[in-house]
Image (tube, rainbow, N blue to C red):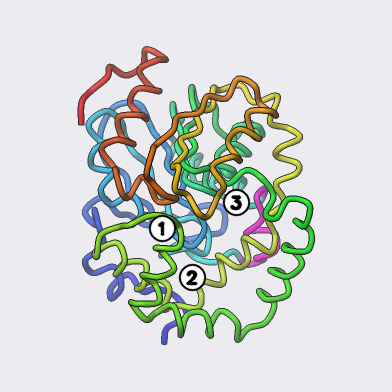
């Protein structure tokens, strides 16, 4: 079992492969996908995912945007940071992704993130690494895990991430398609067989899972929540009512911190709503962009 996914083997039939490229930036070798034309839209996937999670959404968005979608550090085909404790933290990821944006020479007009990817984009915006006109959070993970027990969960994740055999054990179990299917179903979403196979393909690599564990171990959302009131671009939170990973009520908690935040409800969809109903999510992103008068609305 290989520690890291290998592009020549695991990426042989990768979704939107024709848009893939590899770039050196910020001490990392990044895999990213760039496609479309129009204002730049930066996408950031969630923990344990990769560019494959945008497989159906990306082609829809390219009708209105130049889409830039990287694999986050340690995820998918992007290399692991040399110092994971720093590189997989929220500030570290924001810094690394900022270095990639600079290397590409792009200025994202919009940004959309799924789950923890939203936190990365917001940290970038707050730190001046990007200056988007609007940010969209898809089932955004912005509240500390366990809330009052957040420190306990972080310590536990840090302990597990420090045990080299733990990601290998997780990979051994999750590589089984039925196990991967059950894990995904537990998010409250029902995705297609192609999606399940791609997640299972990544889960069989302990290096990919090490990055996910490392994120949880080094993730501290409290500074982000403290700084959120000074966020300049408008934030739209898209919430699936069947999300079993991030409580839908978290969006309202975020709105209590950032009163200007807008909440859009997706009835009957789970944590992977953008994979379940990509056309619906694409229309929301286009509508948010159109409100800035930068992009005209377009139907899916």
Which sits earlier in the primary sequence, circle 1 or circle 3?
Answer: 1
- Look at mark 1 in the image and give the residue it sits on: 50
Which residue is painted at 70% across and 29% down in the image? 257
- Look at mark 3 in the image and give the residue it sits on: 93
Q: Position of residue 132 (x, y in %)?
A: 50, 26
Which residue is painted at 50% across and 54% down in the image? 244
Q: On the image, which quarter does residue 158 sit in?
A: bottom right
> Do the residues bearing badges 2 and 1 touch, measured as CB atoms within 8 Å?
yes
Determine the CA span between mark 1 and mark 3: 14 Å
Q: Pick whichever, 251 or 233, lies toward us.
A: 251
Instruction: Describe the element under mark 1 as helix, strand or loop.
Output: loop
Q: Position of residue 215 (x, y in %)?
A: 62, 60
Which residue is painted at 68% across and 28% down in the image? 256
Quadrant into which the C terminus falls:
top left
Instruction: Describe the element under mark 2 as helix, strand or loop.
Output: helix
Span shown in magenta: 82-91
Check if residue 265 falls in the magenta segment: no
Which residue is painted at 65% across and 65% down in the image? 84
Q: Which mark is residue 114?
A: none
Which sits earlier in the primary sequence, circle 3 or circle 2?
Answer: 3
Q: On the image, which quarter does residue 228 sit in?
A: top right
Instruction: Describe the element under mark 3 as helix, strand or loop.
Output: helix
Q: Give left or right: position of 47 versus 276.
A: right
Q: Main secondary structure of the magenta part?
A: helix
Q: Position of residue 289 (x, y in %)?
A: 38, 22
- Look at mark 2 in the image and give the residue it sits on: 208
Q: Give left or right: position of 178 versus 192.
A: right
User: Mark 1 or mark 3: which is in front?
Assistant: 1
**Other residues around mark 2 within 10 Å, as few (<14) / some (14–19) / many (≥20):** many
Determine the CA span between mark 2 and mark 1: 10 Å
Q: On the image, which quarter does residue 258 sit in?
A: top right
Which sits earlier in the primary sequence, circle 2 or circle 1?
Answer: 1
């Amino acid at each position: 079992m290989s520690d890291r996914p290998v592009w020549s083997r695991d990426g042989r039939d990768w979704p939107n492969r024709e848009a893939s490229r590899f770039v050196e930036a910020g001490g990392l070798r990044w895999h990213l996908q760039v496609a479309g034309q129009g204002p730049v839209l930066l996408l950031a996937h969630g923990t344990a995912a990769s560019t494959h999670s945008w497989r159906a959404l990306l082609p829809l968005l390219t009708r209105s945007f130049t889409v830039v979608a990287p694999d986050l550090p340690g995820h998918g085909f992007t290399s692991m940071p040399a110092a994971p404790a720093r590189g997989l933290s929220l500030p570290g990821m924001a810094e690394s992704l900022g270095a990639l944006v600079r290397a590409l020479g792009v200025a994202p007009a919009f940004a959309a993130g799924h789950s923890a990817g939203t936190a990365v984009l917001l940290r970038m915006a707050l730190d001046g690494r990007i200056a988007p006109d609007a940010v969209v959070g898809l089932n955004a993970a912005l509240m500390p895990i366990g809330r009052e027990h957040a420190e306990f969960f972080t310590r536990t994740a840090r302990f597990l991430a420090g045990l080299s055999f733990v990601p290998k054990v997780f990979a051994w179990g999750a590589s089984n398609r039925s196990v991967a299917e059950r894990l995904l179903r537990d998010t409250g979403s029902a995705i297609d067989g192609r999606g399940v196979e791609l997640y299972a393909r990544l889960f069989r690599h302990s290096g990919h899972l090490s990055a996910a564990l490392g994120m949880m171990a080094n993730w501290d959302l409290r500074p982000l929540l403290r700084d959120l009131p000074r966020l300049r671009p408008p934030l739209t939170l898209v919430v699936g009512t069947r999300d079993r990973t991030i409580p839908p009520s978290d969006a309202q908690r975020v709105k209590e911190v950032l009163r200007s935040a807008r909440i859009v409800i997706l009835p009957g969809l789970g944590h992977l709503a953008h994979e379940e109903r990509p056309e619906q999510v694409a229309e929301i992103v286009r509508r948010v962009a159109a409100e800035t008068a930068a992009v005209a609305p377009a139907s899916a």
